Amino acid sequence: MRPLNRALDTVLGVHNYYQQVGGEDHVFANETALLEQNGHTVLRHEEHNGRIESGTITAARDAVWSRYTFQHLESLARSTTIGLAHFHNTFPLISPAAYYAVQRAGIPVVQTLHNFRLICAGATLSRNGAVCESCLERKSLLPGIAHGCYRNSRSATIAVTTMLTVHRAAGTYQTQVDAYIALSEFARRKFIEGGLPRDRIVVKPNCVSPDPGAGDGRGGYALFVGRLSEEKGVGTLAAAWRKSNTIPLRVAGDGPLRDTAWPEGVTWLGIQPRDHVMRLMQGARVLVLPSTCYENGPMSIIEAFACGLPVIASNLGSLPEFVTHGRTGLLFRPGDPEDLARKVRWAVEHPEELRAMRANARREYEEKYTAERNYKMLISIYEMAIENFQRRRREAS
C-alpha cells in the first residue's frame, strides 16, 4: 500500500515506556502499526523506565536533557531520510533534547499530549483523588512541589518541575514542536490555558485497531478496566456496589488500591491481556468509568464502543464529550456512589433502552474511532506540522 503522502514514506516514532504497561504504550503500538499497514516505514526510538531501577542513568538529569538521546537521534536523522518525527512520551529518559536533535536535522515534530504532564507535575491535574488546578491557576509549579504531586515525593517533583521550568524558559514547547495532538476538546482548552500555542493543537481521538467486533452483553456483569488508584474513582466504585449490588462487577486492573475491601458480588481479576479485556467488554452489560480526575481521552471508552458496550461515566472533564447521556451510556455525579448505584440500577432495569445504547455505542465507534478514519486524521496533522515547520524556517531566514 502506498502512503497518502509520499513525503512521509519514513516516520520516526519516539516513545518512553512506563514500568507498567498503560494506555499510552498501546496507542504508540497501534499508531505505529497503522502507519506501517498503510505503507510507511516507521523507525522507532524507544526507552523503558525499567532502566531507572537498574541505576544505569541519572533520571533527574536526563529528564531535563538526555545527552545520549540527543546524540543518537541527531546521528539517526542525518543518516536517514525521515519525513517527520512523532513523539508520544519523552519523560523521563528521552527528554525534550530529542526535539532539538531532529529539528536541527530539518525534521518536523509532532507531539501527542497523552496526559497533562506539560502543565502539571503529576500529569493528572488531580490531588488526593480530586481535581486540582492550582499550578494552572497560579501559573506556577510551586504548588506541585509543595504537595509532592509526582510520586508523592517533593524531591521527585522537583526533578519534573525543573524539566518543565527549563524548557518553558527556553521556549522549547513554542519553538520545537510543529503540531500537538490533544485527545479531546476539553484537554485542548486546558493546554491552551497552560500556555501551549493555540494554533498548533489539533484534536484527534485514539482509535481501536483491529476491530474486535460487537458483543452481546450476555455475561450479565458490569465491568471496570483501569488503574486501581484514588483518582480513578475506585473508592466511589466500591461504595456504589456496597449500596446496591444489583449486578455482578468484574474489575480488571492493578494499582495501589488493589487491596480494596471489595463488597460481595465484585471479582478482582488483576491485569488482563488486551484480547481478554476485549472479550470481557463483549460480554459485559455496561462499562463503569468513575474517575474523579480529568480524563484526557480514555482508551477504555473507545474500546467499549467498538464492542458495542454502553458506558456509565463521571460527568467530568472530557468524559461528556465521549459519552452521550441516554444515547451511548449514562453520566453520573463525580464521586457520588449513590448516583452511580442509581445509574447502574436503571441500566439493569431497562434492558430495551440498554439494547439501543449498545447499537448506538457501536455506531459511534464506526463513525469516529476506526483505524481508517484515524489514519486520515493523522496524515492531515502531519501535513499541517510540515507546513508549520516550513513557514517557521522561512520566517527565520
Image: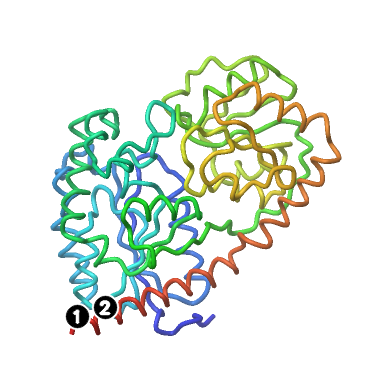
Q: Amino acid at mark 2?
A: Arg
Label 2, secondary structure: give it.
helix
- Please, is residue 119 above or below residue 200 in the view? above
Q: Amino acid at mark 1?
A: Ala
Q: Whole-percent x and y of residue 181?
A: 43, 61
Write the residue at 30% across / 40% down. 135
Q: Are marks 1 and 2 in contact (CB under 8 Å)?
A: yes
* Scheme of image coloration: rainbow
Write the residue at 61% across / 37% down. 313
Q: Quadrant of the N terminus?
A: bottom right
On the image, which quarter does residue 79 sit in? bottom left
Residue under label 1? 396
Label 1, secondary structure: give it.
helix
On the image, which quarter does residue 101 sit in? bottom left
Question: Across the whole image, how many numbered discs are drawn on residues?
Answer: 2
Crowding at dot 1, Cα within 10 Å, few <14 / some 14-19 / many 20+, comes out as few
Q: Is residue 192 left or right of residue 297?
A: left
